[in-house]
Amino acid sequence: MKRQMIRLLLVLLFATVAVGCTKTINVEQQPYESRLALEGLLMPGSTPQIFLTKTVPFFTSDQTPSTLFVRDADLSIEGPDGVDLLVVDSTYNQFYCRYEPFYRGSIPIRFDATYHLRLTHSERLYEASTVTNIPAVTITHTEYVSEFVDIYGGHEGVIVDFDDIPGRADQYRFEMTRLLDNTHETVDEREYSSACLPDGEIIEVRDIGRFIYFDDRLDGAPVRFVVEPAHTHRKGDVAFLYIQSLDRAAADYYDRLDRQREANVNPFIEPVFLSSSIDGLIGVFGAMNRSPVVEFIFPEDAL
């Protein structure tokens, strides 16, 4: 009887503690000064695309590409073929049902050339330069794995092998473009499928890997990426695989951005501050190159 009473008291104590741990906290918004954030990677053979947005407080509810985009700036890029005056343009992302605006140039980028960015906004001038001398690698092998384990648990994945370019510092990340319909979903916690894509219509979706690989300690060695696809797939679905080569400034920026995301959801990770290759604002103006495309066909379902 005494043991039963003790157990009952312990249960009541734990229940009281559990209830006591729930507390609503009202966060008062502090004064906030918005800053410009710019992302622009120049790739040989393509025309410039510069994404220019403004920063907002963490709890801002409306954070779509259109509401964050800064439309009243003047941007130009000077290169070996003259000055390219960038204009506002956009693409419609049919998977997420939204427009994604950017500044578009018209002069194709050359390999191994110097480019200078000039941005004017609110009577302030921002400048940055980059050199498009980043060599591309070649994918040597691809395969599919039903399950691999990382810090997030077990996943199915795509394996991509390539050889690092010896004798230089290199940085890489993964890229995949896929053809999807409205029955495909994202594999994150949202499990989102397109709400505006008509039945039977197929669109191309581009996924960029978050992880950045640095060859600092393994110069010239074979490299293997094992990547979880960002969307579900079926047997026979086609994907197109690339390896992006980034300059150091771009790699540092996106590596810090990824680690900052991790710090936002994991209280045991130390805060990470973003770097910037442009004085006075957040972001990066850099160079990249891309491997020749490799077609990949999924051998089984993952829904």
Image (tube, rainbow, N blue to C red):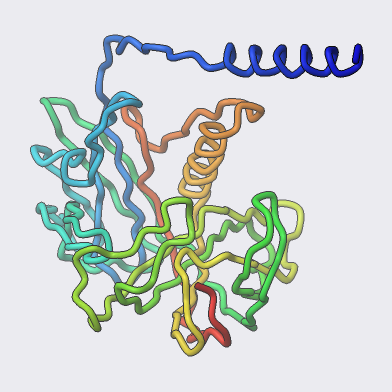
Q: Quadrant of residue 171?
A: bottom right
Taking 238 as reference, is 42 above or below it?
Answer: above
Q: Residue at x 75, y 68 (%)?
A: 221
Taking 139 as reference, is 264 above or below it?
Answer: above
| Residue 201 position within the rendered picture, expressed as x and y whole percent measured from the top left | 23, 81
**How many marks are shown on the rendered structure?**
0
Quadrant where the image shows the N terminus: top right
Q: Which residue is drawn at 59% across and 15% down?
A: 21
Q: Which residue is drawn at 64% across and 53% down?
A: 214
The front one of 35 and 230 is 230
| Residue 130 position within the rendered picture, expressed as x and y whole percent measured from the top left | 38, 50
Residue 103 located left or right of residue 20 = left
Q: Which residue is drawn at 63% across and 18% down?
A: 18
Taking 147 as reference, is 23 above or below it?
Answer: above
Q: In which quarter of the image is residue 96?
A: bottom left
Which residue appears farthest toward the front when viewing the image?
Answer: 1
Which residue appears farthest toward the right when viewing the image?
Answer: 2
| Residue 195 position within the rendered picture, expressed as x and y whole percent measured from the top left | 23, 63
Q: Quadrant of residue 55?
A: top left
The front one of 293 and 158 is 158
